[in-house]
Every structure is written in structure tokens, then in C-alpha cells.
Amino acid sequence: SKFVNDKWMIKNGFLTDVQENKPWWWNIKVQKLNLSAPLILLPEVSCQKAIEILQEKGYDQAPVVAESGLILGMVTLSNTLSSVLAGNVEFSDPVTKVTYDQFSKIGLEDSLGKLSCILENDHFAIVVHEQMQFSGNGSSFMKQMVFGVVTAMDLLTFVSRNDKK
């Protein structure tokens, strides 16, 4: 039934402009949110260190990205703390043991309308920017770089500060 669900179709890039009475911000690009640079954790960071870093820097969550640039998922402060306190992981375990690998990505050029569809089901989306990289032999490939993490609060703040009505 997903193929007849417009919100799923928008979230997955199969449909655009399905809402008839779009709000003024619907077609504005995600890059206009002026997101702050994300805090990124490498997969070998321990759960204890991740908790310390997130608390010290004032973040609730952070993407976990391999040195190759592969986005492995998101780690949240609450999930890490609850997993440690429940005994499911040790403080010394790598943060990958508490990483959510189910997450949505959105590009800087995507619309806030698409973002709002994603945020109806997800607590956050990882904002990515694709970049072409070339190796020494001249071959090229597209690499995704984490540009930020966006939440419903970021969208709501943007809309309320720039409300045109």
C-alpha cells in the first residue's frame, strides 16, 4: 500500500507537489534553514565517551560516520544512557552498539515540504550533500557528506521566524 501513500512517495523521492494548498515555505530549500555544523562521532568512540561529548557540547544526538565517509546511523544521548543503565551495553562498548541504523536522509536542495513529510514519522533527518571525488587513477564517485541534522523544531523555528502571514 506504500505506492498509494503520497507522503511515503514524497519521502522517497517518487512524487513532488502533491499538496494543493501548500504553505508559503513548502518549496523553500533545506539549505535555507542555516543549520549548524553537526557533531560527528567515529564508530570506535566508546559509549561513555559519546555520552561525555554529547553532554559537554550540548547535543541530544550525533551522526556516526566511518572514516570512509559512510553514514552508519545516529546515536542519541537518551538511547545510549538507557542502554547502559539497562545493562544491554557497557560504557566501554563502541557507540555502534547503540546506533540507530534506520534514518532518513535529505539533501540541501530538497524542499522543506519533503522534509516535513519525513518529520511526520521520524524524529530527525540527516542532511547530506553529495560531492564528486576523484581518485589518483582518474576514476570518480559520488560521496555523501553529513551537512547537519534537522529536527521538527528546526523546521518550526524557521517557519515561525519567517512567517509571511
Image (cartoon, rainbow, N blue to C red):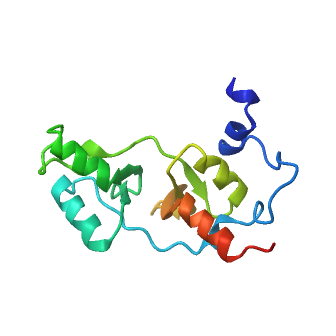
Regarding residue 145, the answer to whether it shows in the image is: yes
Which one is in front, 102 or 140?
102
Quadrant assignment for the C terminus: bottom right
Quarter assignment of residue 65:
bottom left
In the picture shown, does residue 150 fall above or below 37? Answer: above
The residue at 53%/46% (across/down) is 122
Query: Which residue occupies the extreme front position in the image?
Result: 165
The residue at 45%/63% (across/down) is 136
Residue 125 picture location, percent across and down: 53, 54
In the picture shown, does residue 93 fall above or below 51? Answer: above
The residue at 12%/45% (across/down) is 90
The residue at 64%/71% (across/down) is 158
Regarding residue 134, the answer to whether it shows in the image is: no
Which one is in front, 17 or 64?
17
In the picture shown, does residue 17 fall above or below 127? Answer: above
Quadrant assignment for the N terminus: top right
Quarter assignment of residue 108:
bottom right
- Total numbered labels: 0
Along the horizontal axis of the image, is 113 left or right of 148? right
Along the horizontal axis of the image, is 125 left or right of 61? right
Query: Which residue occupies the extreme top position in the image?
Result: 1
Residue 156 picture location, percent across and down: 61, 64
Along the horizontal axis of the image, is 26 left or right of 145? right
Residue 152 picture location, percent across and down: 56, 58
